[in-house]
Amino acid sequence: MWHKFFGILFFMLTIANEWEAIDRNLCLKLVNSMSTRIDLVIESEGGVINY
């Protein structure tokens, strides 16, 4: 039982560390380009887009 608890705790800490490591500029770039990417997906009727 303790092994499972520490596995979950390790997982949560890993996710938190990776979340904090995400570059702010990357997030802003993705947010700012979202409408363009959505339009491309709609135009391709849900297919693959080259973006």
Image (spheres, rainbow, N blue to C red):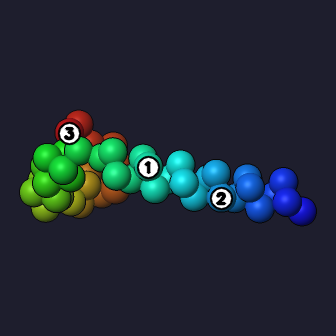
Check the picture and name the quadrant holding the C terminus.
Answer: top left
Q: Is residue 36 visible?
A: no
State which tag comes first along the sequence, 1 or 3: 1
Give 41 or 18, whichever is nearer the viewer. 18
Q: How many other residues sit within 10 Å of disc 1, few (<14), some (14-19) or many (≥20)? A: few
Residue indicated by mark 2: 9
Q: Is residue 33 left or right of residue 8?
A: left
For residue 51, which numbered disc appears in the image?
3
Secondary structure of the residue carrying numbered label 1:
helix
Location of residue 38 in the rendering, given as x and y in whole percent from the top left corner:
21, 59
Looking at numbered disc 3 in the image, what kind of residue is underneath it? Tyr
Residue indicated by mark 1: 17
Determine the CA span between mark 3 and mark 2: 36 Å
Looking at numbered disc 1 in the image, what kind of residue is underneath it? Asn
State which tag comes first along the sequence, 2 or 1: 2
Question: Residue at the location (89% across, 62% down)?
Answer: 1
Q: Nearer the viewer, mark 1 or mark 3?
A: 1
Extreme-right residue of the structure = 1
